[in-house]
Structures are given as C-alpha cells and as structure tokens.
Image: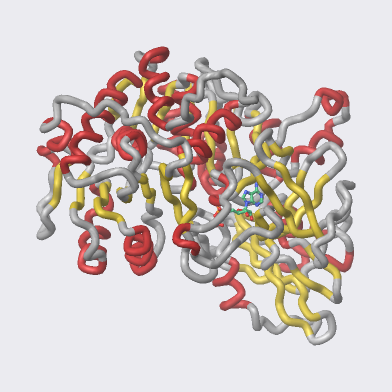
C-alpha cells in the first residue's frame, strides 16, 4: 500500500521559487568583477532574472540535458546561472579556472559543453581555450554592454541576452532524478572525473546542510561562501541559503584577507566557509591590523584538515565557532561536521579540543564505515583505522560516462581516505590512502605531523611526505615554510615534536622551502612534492 501524500519532485527551481515567495526582499550582495564595487539584488529579482536567462539559454539552443559550462567567481550572475540552467533541466557544469588550460579543454570536451559563460577575468583563458573546444557553440561574457571586451572571438553578452527576453520561462516539470549539475574532481592522479548531481541529491543535501548540527543556517544568517562556486557548488551554500532564506554575500574575485574582512564587516556576515589556506591569509590580516569580527558567529573549514592551531585561534582569540567539516566532490560534498553532543559540553577544555580536532559526525543522509585490507569492517573505537567507505542519497554511484568503471564496493563508495570512527560517531581522517607513510609495516599520519608542525609559532605552512628508506621502506620528510622573518632551524623544529607524537613518528629530516605547491582547490599538492623530494637522501638512510 502506497502512502497517500503528494508526490512533488524535489527540484532546484523549487528552492529559488520558495526564496522568491517567502524571502523575496532578502538581499544578495556581490562584489562586482568589473570594478570591485558592490552590487545588490534580492531573491525576488534573482528569480525573475533566472527565468529570463533560462529563456535566453533556450534561444541559444540549450535544452534538457545540454551542458552549460561556467568559468566564474562567486557572484550574482553565477548564482542566476545555477538556477536558470538547472531549472530548465540542463546541466550546470562549473569549471575550475585554476586547472591547467589543457585540463580545462579536456573537461569541456568530455562534458560536451555547448555554451560556456565566463567572468571577464577569464577572457584570456577563454581565448586560449576556444581553439581547443570546437564543440562550444557560444561563449557568453558575464557582463553588460558597457563592459564588453574587445575580442577576436564572437562573444555573447550576458546582460544583452537577459534584456532580449523580457518574459521568463515557466519552470518545466522535471523528474527529480534528472541531472542538474556537473563537477569534475581535481584529478591529482589521472584525468579528472565528472560527478553528475541530480535535482533530488542537491535538494536533499541542501536540507541536510542546514541542520543545526551541520551548518546551522537560518533566515537570520548572512552567509559569505569564500569556497568558490566552482568547487563542489560552493559546498551547496547557493542551494541551502535560499532554502532557509539567508542573505548571501558573494566576494567575487577578491579573496585576500583585507577584502574579505571589509565585506564581513560591511554586510554583517554571520557564517562563512572555506579551505584552511584562505583562513591563513585572513587571520594574518586580522592579527596584523588588530581587527575583531563584528558579527561572524561561525565558519565552516574543510577541504583539507583544519590545523588544530587554527581552530584554537578562531575560537579562543576571536570567539568564532569553527565547524570543521569533511567531504568530497563525490559527496556533494558534505559528509561530516564537527559539533558537540550534549554530554560532551561538560568535558574539560582539553578533552573538548581533542574532539574538535576530528572531522566530525555524519549528518543524516550519510552512512560510513571503516574496513581493513581484507574488506572486513573495523571496530568503531577511535583507535582502529582503515579505508573509509560511505553511502547515501547524495553520494556518487558512478562517474559521468562511466569513467573509471564502477567505483562502488558492495554498494559503498570508497573515499580514498584512511580514518578512525569512535563510539560517538566522530570520524577522524588519518590520511589520504595515497599519502599515508608506511614505515616498517606501520602507518604514520602525514596530517598529524603537519598539524603538529604548524602549531609552532614560526611555521607558516608544513607538508610531510614519505621518502624511500632502505630499512623502514618509507620515512617521513618534513617540508616547512617559515613565517616572514622567522629563523627556526632543523633541531628546534624536531625538538618541537617531542612529547607530541610517538618517537618513531619523528620526521627523519626537515627541509625549509619558500613555498609549497597547491592543487587548484587549495590543497597541498603531494604528487608534486613526491616528484621533487621523493628521492631525498635521508640522514638516517
Ligand atoms: P579532490 O579530491 O578533487 O581534491 P575534493 O574537494 O573532492 O577534491 O577532496 C576530497 C578530499 O579532501 C577528501 O577525500 C579528503 O581527503 C580531503 N578533505 C576534505 N575535507 C577534509 C578535512 N576536513 N580534513 C581532512 N581532509 C579533508
């Protein structure tokens, strides 16, 4: 017997319709790409313009399932595209402009993008790409007539397209399982693979993300996603914010500490989100200028392990709650968020800090387990660590065009992370399986060593990789970027580890470098480090 409830599909257009109807005058504030000035609009106007943009896209030949690429910062036009494209059943393919042009051309071709919309910043990139992207029929500059650049390419003008379509579309009825957006993994090894989200997965993820023990979003929040809209849909915030009617603030291309703090303060931002590297710059600026946050209540930090020292600075020095979160492109991306349970509030600070350093608990919709090499499940005791497997309605079941074969193991998605799970459900990433250091049959966590190193006041950034060793197979090598003016030496650095990690985990050598390489999403690029330092001659070898 079926239940007798309405079977309304969970569609992306319903999010912006809701925001228009119930939060119509709530603001969307953006820093303009053209000149850095502030642009203001509302959910009502975004919805109206998205419907007109959708009509314009149809005019360009976009139909259901057509892929529309974007090369754009966080801003209102990108936000409008999210809804216009998915709303008519087409697929919004957000492209990471920080990838190498060859990788982008590969992705555009693989996705079969018919239209690509880009911010003016990326015109030089687009001109380089165009000859290698023969399938793209229209390149749309996301600006108005007055700012249209001179180019040998025949460009469409975003605002002209909207102006030419005074009547917006009525959103068509869609199957909630139909594809809505596409995001490629950054592919640190091999070709990038496409993760194809559906309307249903996106709306369920948006619901889950708003929960109090997740990102805790409401109509009283002002949300500034620093995480780019080309990095897993800005962690879903462009969908979650309209769901609750939160005000949105988009920083455009200005992601330096000073510009961000200025927006935080001017717009009364209560919630932000970004990768640890972004916060390094922001915190350095705050400290140098002696600034405080006026309204900021919490910030989501994820994408790579948040160093405990950063959590402490935010919470203890600035009174800003850190929501340490873990996830991946294949998970839309949210998997876990770290918030306390009632019982844990009574613990002393040391015990609470230890819990907070973990990546957090699964939100409803995500199930996880850890398994050993033989595939057998390992205990949830906070000690045993193994391959982390996940499943849920917003987790990838297969890559676009079946790339890489069936990724699942018995219905579970292998994350490529090594983790522990404790009895309270808190997960802690020990390492990415390819980064873990295998020393004499035992595993050393590169993340633990990096977190310890960056707690030293002279250290700006640190990376640990495994280096070949004749006796132990692999031993840890520590690479350190000193803070400006710091004179920290090898012995002092190593002494700092004593008592903080097991003796046999101590790095075998320390190399001081000017900078560390990062991936297009701001993570340490360990493949490059292994290429450059994998044959380092350890003094112990
Ligand atoms: P990519 O894999 O393409 O670099 P993702 O953003 O999908 O991009 O990366 C997902 C991976 O990032 C996770 O599998 C995990 O290794 C790492 N990661 C994400 N958040 C955290 C976190 N809070 N702590 C440690 N690692 C994290």
Is residue 511 shown left or right of residue 280? right
- Seen at 55% across and 66% down, the residue is 405
Q: Residue furthest front?
A: 1
The residue positioned 10% from the left and 38% from the top of the image is 146
Residue 423 vs 270, above or below: the answer is below
Residue 462 visible in the picture: yes
Q: Nearer the viewer, residue 424 or 313?
A: 424
Residue 151: x and y in percent read 12, 56
What colour scheme does the image use?
secondary structure
What quarter of the picture does the N terminus occupy?
top right
| Whether residue 192 is situated above or below residue 381 in the rendered picture | below
| Residue 324, picture quadrant | top right
Front in this rendered view, residue 246 or 475: 246
Q: Position of residue 49 (x, y in %)?
A: 25, 27
Can residue 226 be seen here? Answer: no
Position of 352 with respect to 24 (left or right) is right
**Which residue is rendered at x = 83% and y = 32% of the image?**
349
Location of residue 461 (image quadrant): bottom right
Going by the image, does 87 lie left or right of 476?
left
Residue 535 coordinates in the image, percent (x, y): 65, 83
Query: Nearest the camera: 112 or 223?
Result: 112
Residue 242 x/y as whole percent:
44, 24
Of residues 44 and 291, the one drawn nearer to the viewer in this rendering: 44
Quadrant of image for the C terminus: bottom right
Number of callouts: 0
Q: Residue at x 80, y 62 (%)?
A: 375
Answer above or below: position of 20 versus 485. above
**In the picture, residue 526 is in which quadrant?**
bottom right
Left or right of 179 on screen, residue 405: right
């Amino acid at each position: 017997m079926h239940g007798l409830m309405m079977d309304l599909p969970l569609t992306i257009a319903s999010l912006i319709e809701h925001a228009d109807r119930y939060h119509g005058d709530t603001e969307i504030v953006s820093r303009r790409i053209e000149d850095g000035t502030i642009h203001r609009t509302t959910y009502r106007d975004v919805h109206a313009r998205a419907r007109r943009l959708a009509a314009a896209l149809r005019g360009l030949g976009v139909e259901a399932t057509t892929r529309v690429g974007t090369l754009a910062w966080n801003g209102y036009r990108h936000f409008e595209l999210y809804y216009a494209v998915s709303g008519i059943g087409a697929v919004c393919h957000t492209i990471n402009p920080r990838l190498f042009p060859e990788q982008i051309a590969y992705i555009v071709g693989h996705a079969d993008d018919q239209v690509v919309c880009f911010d003016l910043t990326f015109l030089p990139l687009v001109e380089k790409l165009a000859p290698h992207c023969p399938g793209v029929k229209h390149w749309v500059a996301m600006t108005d007539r007055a700012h249209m650049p001179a180019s040998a390419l025949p460009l469409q003008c975003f605002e002209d397209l909207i102006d030419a379509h005074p009547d917006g579309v009525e959103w068509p009825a869609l199957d909630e399982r139909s594809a809505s957006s596409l995001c490629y993994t950054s592919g640190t090894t091999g070709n990038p693979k496409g993760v194809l989200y559906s309307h249903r997965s996106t709306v369920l993820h948006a619901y889950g993300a708003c929960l109090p023990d997740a990102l805790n979003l409401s109509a009283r929040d002002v949300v500034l996603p620093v995480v780019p809209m080309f990095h897993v849909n800005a962690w879903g915030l462009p969908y979650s914010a309209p769901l609750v009617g939160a005000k949105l603030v988009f920083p455009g291309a200005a992601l330096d500490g000073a510009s961000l703090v200025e927006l935080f303060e001017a717009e009364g931002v209560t919630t932000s989100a970004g990768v640890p590297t972004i916060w390094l710059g922001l915190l350095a600026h705050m400290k140098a200028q002696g600034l405080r946050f006026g309204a900021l209540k919490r910030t989501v930090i994820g994408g790579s392990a948040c160093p405990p020292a950063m959590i402490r600075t935010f919470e203890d020095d600035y009174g800003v709650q850190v929501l340490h979160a873990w996830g991946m492109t294949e998970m839309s991306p949210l998997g876990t968020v770290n918030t306390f349970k009632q019982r844990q509030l009574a613990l002393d600070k040391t015990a609470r800090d230890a819990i907070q350093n973990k990546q957090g608990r699964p939100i409803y919709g995500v199930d996880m387990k850890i398994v050993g090499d033989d595939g057998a499940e390992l205990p949830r005791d906070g000690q045993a660590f193994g391959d982390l497997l996940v499943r849920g309605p917003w987790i990838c079941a297969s890559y676009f065009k079946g790339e890489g074969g069936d990724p699942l193991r018995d219905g579970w998605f292998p994350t490529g992370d090594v983790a522990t799970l404790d009895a309270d459900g808190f997960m802690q990433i020990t390492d990415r399986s390819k980064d873990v250091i295998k020393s004499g049959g035992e595993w050393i966590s590169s993340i633990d060593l990096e977190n310890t190193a960056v707690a030293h006041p002279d250290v700006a950034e640190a990376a640990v990789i495994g280096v070949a060793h004749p006796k132990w197979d692999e031993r840890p090598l520590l690479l350190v970027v000193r803070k400006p003016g710091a004179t920290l030496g090898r012995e002092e650095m190593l002494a700092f580890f004593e008592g903080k990690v097991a003796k046999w985990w101590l790095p075998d050598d320390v190399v001081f470098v000017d900078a560390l390489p990062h991936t297009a999403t701001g993570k340490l690029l360990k493949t490059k480090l292994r290429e450059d330092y994998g044959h380092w001659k350890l003094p112990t070898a």
